[in-house]
Amino acid sequence: MAKSTGGSSKLLWLMILLVLLSTGAAAAAIYMVMSDRNGADEGNAQTQQLERKAPIFVKIDPFTVNLADDSYGSRLLYTGISLKVGNDETRAILTEHMPQVRSRLLMLFSGKQASELTSPEGKRRLGEEVIATLAEPLTEPQPPLEVQDVLFTEFIVQ
C-alpha cells in the first residue's frame, strides 16, 4: 500500500468544490428567474391599475309613477335608478338636464303595466327602453350620450 491517499484526497476536495460551485450557480439562476417573474408581475399589476378606470354613475332620485291600468285597477311603481355612463361629458349633460331626464322616464314608466315589470326579463327590457329613451338629444347640438347600463337600485310595484 503505497501513499495513494494524497491523490484521492485532492480528487475528493475537487469534487466537493465542483458540487459547491454548481449549487451556487443553480441558486443564483433560480434567484434571477424568480426576481424577473416578480418584477414582471409587478409591472403588469401597475399597468392594469393604470388602465383600470373607475366607473361613472349618475344617480336619479327615486320617484313614484302611476302605471297603466290593468285587470287589478290602478297600480304604482316606486323606483330608483342609477345610470352607468361612459364619460364625464355624458354625466354632465344628464345632470344639467335632469328635469328632462326624469320627465322622459316618468312618461316611459307610466305607459307600462305592472305585469310587464315584475319579471327579470321585463326589468331588462325596461332598462333597454330607458337607454333608447335617453338616446334622443336633450338639447341641440348635443354629442351622443354614452349610457352603458341602467341599474335599478329600488323597484317596488304595488
Image (cartoon, helix red, strand yellow):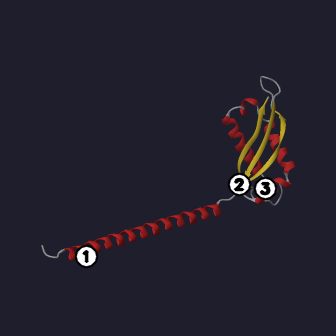
**Mark 3 or mark 2, which is nearer to you?**
2
The residue indicated by pointer 1 is: 10
Other-residue count near label 3 (Cα within 10 Å), few / some / many at <14 / 14–19 / ≥20: many
Mark positioned earlier in the residue sequence (3 or 1): 1
**Mark 3 or mark 1, which is nearer to you?**
1
The residue indicated by pointer 2 is: 55
Q: Name which residue lies at 26% across and 71% down.
A: 12
Residue 122 sits above or below residue 41 on the image: above
Residue 156: x and y in percent read 78, 33
Task: Residue at the far left: name it.
Answer: 1
Quadrant in the picture for residue 26: bottom left
Q: Amino acid at mark 3?
A: Arg
Q: CA distance from mark 3 to mark 2?
A: 11 Å
76, 3: nearer the viewer? 3
Q: CA distance from mark 2 to mark 1?
A: 71 Å
Q: Are marks 3 and 2 in contact (CB under 8 Å)?
A: no
Q: Amino acid at mark 1?
A: Lys
Q: Name which residue lies at 16% across and 76% down.
A: 3
SS category of the residue bearing label 1: helix
Q: CA distance from mark 3 to mark 1?
A: 81 Å
